[in-house]
Amino acid sequence: MGSSYKGGTSYQHSFRENLPEVTADYPLNGNHFGTSHHGSTWTYEIEADNPSEAAKAFYDKIGLGGAFYKYGANGLEIVEMSDGTRIVYRPITKSGSPAVEINIQKSDDNGGVKSHKIHFVKKKGK
Amino acid sequence: MSDLRINGEAKSLLKSVIGGKLIKYRHDPFTITPSFTIQGEVFFEDKILRVRSEEMAADFFEAGEEEISALFVEKIAEEDAMSACIGIKQIDFPVGEKVKDIWIVDEKIQEFVDNKPGETYDLTRGVVFILEDMQLGFEKDIWLSVEIYPHKGDDVLKDFQRLGADLNGWPKGCMSKNKRTAYSLLDGRVIFEEANETGEDPLAD
């Protein structure tokens, strides 16, 4: 057991090569996805009718072809892309909304994206 | 203000192994980065300590509750000394050296937005075991990561990530003042101290 490539790809993808597919649905806002979460400068949010489904769909796209690890705690999943980017999927978080984290600290090609966390929240006022 | 430093109980546990022998340590095999995810274990003659990184809720930069990874040290039973990842078998690294001292590496970070002070938070960046012939350190990764970097050598503090590395990509008007302090658990003396400022990212939106 251990890792395989997420989505059953035949090789390990880089973070950059997944970006076109992701940004077609979720355009980058400068060097991050989403808008500021509660005024934070570190975390962002994407609104969705169904935050859980949206978080999973975003993670499936951005983490496609990553070396895949599954943890017992609250459905945590981590994928490692070939450039060193690490994508973390948290369907359950302490603040309540599902989240995807992008960690480019060890990436050698981050595609212009910074390390940040994206919460998926219910669309407001709808 | 948020305080995410290791607590008194963890420090007591660490103090209790000073003078004893560190038998081995155990963690997941490395993949892309020389780090392991969430937890690793350190074995002594009479106990096993787990070094763990977990996201904790903190009142954070006036943004309400957010999760920041924090370092924990706790005593565990042998049957619990395993990977947090399903299907991964951890690897043992034999050591067999006496623990002469333990250093705690803490950081204080204060945010400034448009030159006005914001939140301050304290965290423990790492724990360093000072052994007979080497140092063995465990360093927590940046705020949104539960990776832990093990370091082995003569001066492991120099292998720790740059102070303020957490804070890349600040938007306009945001900066922070950061301070890192390593102190001895044996006698409380300060071993190392540094401070810097992390400014806005010129490419930020």
Image: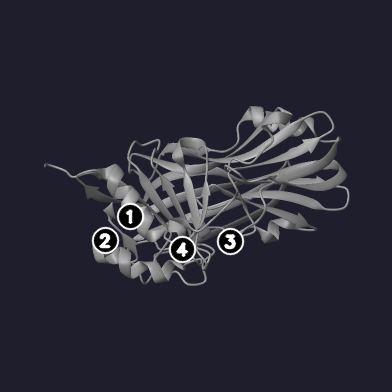
Task: Give amino acid for label 3.
Answer: Arg
Task: Give amino acid for label 1.
Answer: Phe
Dot 3, crowdedness within 10 Å: few (<14), some or many (≥20)?
few
Please name which of the two marks, 3 or 4, marks the residue nearer to the observer.
4
Which residue is labeled 4 in the image? A9
First in residue order: circle 1 vs circle 4: 4
Dot 2, crowdedness within 10 Å: few (<14), some or many (≥20)?
some
| Proximity of marks 1 and 2: CB atoms separated by less than 8 Å | yes
Please name which of the two marks, 1 or 4, marks the residue nearer to the observer.
4
Specify the label residue B162 is tagged with.
3
Alpha-carbon distance for marks 3 and 2?
32 Å
Q: Is residue B84 left or right of residue A28?
A: right
Alpha-carbon distance for marks 1 and 4?
17 Å
Check if mark 3 and mark 1 are on a common chain. no
The residue furthest left is A126
Alpha-carbon distance for marks 4 and 2?
22 Å
Alpha-carbon distance for marks 3 and 1?
31 Å
Residue positioned 60% across, 44% down in the render: B87
Q: Is residue A39 visible?
A: no
Check if mark 1 and mark 4 are on a common chain. yes
Q: Secondary structure at mark 4?
A: loop
Task: Give amino acid for label 2.
Answer: Tyr
First in residue order: circle 4 vs circle 2: 4
Please name which of the two marks, 3 or 1, marks the residue nearer to the observer.
1
Say which of A98 and B86 sits in front. Answer: B86
Which residue is labeled 2 in the image? A26
Q: Which quadrant of the figure contains the N terminus of chain B?
A: top left
Which residue is labeled 1 in the image? A58
Task: Give amino acid for label 4.
Answer: Thr
